[in-house]
Every structure is written in C-alpha cells, then in structure tokens.
Amino acid sequence: GWTGADCNTWVGSGEVQVCDKTCDALVDCNGRGRCQNGDGEGMCVCFDGYEGEHCEHDISVSISSCGCGTSGGDCGAICSALETCHGHGRCSGEDGSCLCFAGWTGADC
C-alpha cells in the first residue's frame, strides 16, 4: 500500500509501484473520486454519480423536463405557489411540495 501526505511512499511488499505525477485528491477530484496513475498522468476515477475531468459534474441531479408549474415523474403534480403555499413559500420543482419562507411552517405554509 501507499502512505505519506501525498500517498506517494510505497510501504507494501512486492514490486514497487511508480507514479510519475502526484495527485491532490481534494483539488483534482473535488473529493468525488480518487486519483489514479494513467500512463504517467494523474487522472480522476470518479465515484458513482459524478463525472468530468475532476469529477465536477453531479450526474445524480436530474433536470426536470416538466413544464412550468408541474413536477414529478409523470409531470402530473401541479403546484401553484399562490394556491398551495398560501403565498408564504414557493413550490419545489422536485416533488411539488411547498418550501416555506422563514417564519412559516406546515405542508402548505
């Protein structure tokens, strides 16, 4: 295995692994992947749900294709902030629920 501040000191048995480029996982992979040597170039191998050169894209977040005022898997949940949130919150585009403004609570604010 590897040890050290940059994980670049080999302490295991057997053949010593060589990595020509060090990788700072916090910077290079945004904490969403691990750095791996790829032909002398440090590269990020992203954890599930992330992609990009530095694992900067969260692909688990989907953008709704529903029209304005609707949400849900079949776009059947209708939300009107004035009707369902009593003007004290806004409609969540995720599931049609109310997100109440400060000082207001309850399912319909």
Image (cartoon, rainbow, N blue to C red):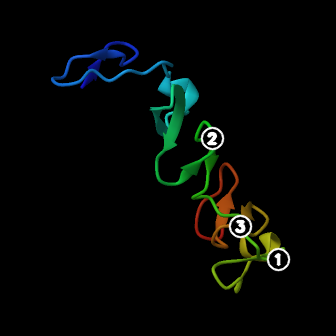
Badge number at residue 84: none
The CA span between labels 1 and 3 is 10 Å
Q: Where residue 51 sits: x, y (%)?
A: 59, 48
Q: Quadrant of the C terminus?
A: bottom right
Of callouts 1 and 3, the N-terminal one: 1
Helix or strand or loop: what does disc 3 sit on?
loop
Q: Where residue 93 sits: x, y (%)?
A: 71, 67
Front one among 99 and 92: 92
Q: Nearer the viewer, mark 2 or mark 3?
A: 2
Quadrant in the rendering for residue 87: bottom right
Q: Where residue 79 sits: x, y (%)?
A: 75, 76
Helix or strand or loop: what does disc 2 sit on?
loop
Badge number at residue 93: 3
Of all residues, the one furthest to the left in this rendering is: 13
Quadrant in the rendering for residue 78: bottom right
| Residue visible at 57% across and 58% down in the picture | 60
Q: Amino acid at mark 2?
A: Glu
The CA span between labels 2 and 3 is 23 Å
Of callouts 2 and 3, the N-terminal one: 2
| Residue visible at 50% across and 22% down in the picture | 23
Circle 2 is placed at which residue position?
56
Answer left or right for 46 relative to 62.
left
Front one among 76 and 51: 51
Quadrant in the rendering for residue 68: bottom right
Circle 1 is placed at which residue position?
67
Q: Amino acid at mark 1?
A: Gly
